[in-house]
Image (cartoon, rainbow, N blue to C red):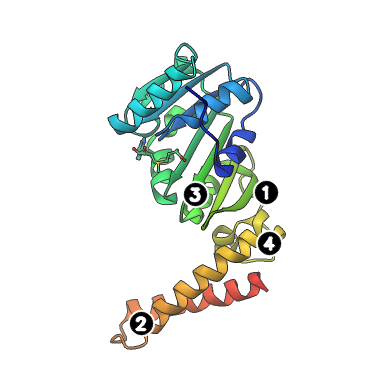
Amino acid sequence: MKKAVLPDRLAVIVEQIDQGAVVADIGTDHGLVPVEAVVRREAGHAVAADVNAGPLQAASDYIAACGLTGKIDTRLGSGLTVLTENDLIDTVVIAGMGGTLISDILEQGREHLRSVQKLILQPNVSADRIRRWLLDNGWKLIREQILKEERHVYEILTAVPGEAEAPYHQQEPLEKQLLFGPYLLGERNNAFKDKWMREKDNWQQILNQLANAVPTEQTTAKKRKLNQYIAWAEEVIT
Ligand SMILES: C[S@@+](CC[C@H](N)C(=O)[O-])C[C@H]1O[C@@H](n2cnc3c(N)ncnc32)[C@H](O)[C@@H]1O
């Protein structure tokens, strides 16, 4: 079987894997990441895990077709619980899920991260939830990347154990930096502007709908938050 073409999003993730790493791809689905980790990054070993049997079977078939069954273990189960100490995983990839689910997986699997030296995380939404988790749990963001592929904008966060506060500046509100990303805020490329222009329009629509809502403590707080986010978005896209 011919090796599948790697989408740009996954190519960027694979580039973040160090040469010779021992990788776990949680929520692997098609198995593209562990295969590329072994082929391109010469990963010593990899674990491809998924909570659903169908995607795991697809990964297993692809791994076998690439002749890599001996190098990549497939495991059925939720999150990091499939990993054992003997795996000596040093790099964990979790991609293509919501930021809340990714941070839940990290939180619920904290004890499985002892040997891990790098997290490569690609949330489809709510990257701020992941930044918050990293900050609260002693993981230092070392890189943020953002790219547009077809109509979607993807953020890729890379973190290592260390000084979690280091990327954040005193001069800016923490909530703003968690939302937009401390490094991405400095760079503000076209994909970043595109994403936040769209988010701003969404927030504006929600705000318009709330205009007719009965004023309660909750709706007032929500309107205040949306107004703040819209003001921040206007600032970062100009
Ligand atoms: C949209 S796919 C993303 C696949 C691949 N990681 C990527 O980025 O292209 C999400 C995958 O995560 C799996 N998944 C969802 N929750 C999970 C969990 N708690 N633990 C492991 N896998 C999970 C799903 O079964 C699905 O195969």
N-term mark: 2 or 4: 4
- Residue type beneath disc 1: Ala
Q: Distance between the residues labelled 1 and 4?
A: 20 Å
Q: Depth-wise, is mark 2 or mark 3 nearer the camera? A: 2
Question: Circles 1 and 2: CB distance less than 8 Å?
Answer: no
* Mark 1 or 3: the one toward you: 3
- Disc 2 from disc 4: Cα separation: 29 Å
Query: Which of the two discs, 1 and 4, labels the residue nearer the N terminus?
Result: 1
Q: Give the label, 1 or 2, closer to the camera.
A: 2
Amino acid under label 2? Gln
Q: Earlier in the sequence, mark 1 or mark 2?
A: 1
Whole-angstrom CA distance, mark 3 to mark 4, is 20 Å
CB atoms of marks 3 and 4 within 8 Å: no
- Give the residue pinned by disc 3: 130
Name which quarter of the figure residue 37 lies in. top right
Q: Earlier in the sequence, mark 1 or mark 3?
A: 3
Other-residue count near label 1 (Cα within 10 Å), few / some / many at <14 / 14–19 / ≥20 = few
Q: Mark 2 points at which residue?
A: 209
Q: Where is residue 201 in the image (x, y as percent from the top left)?
A: 49, 75
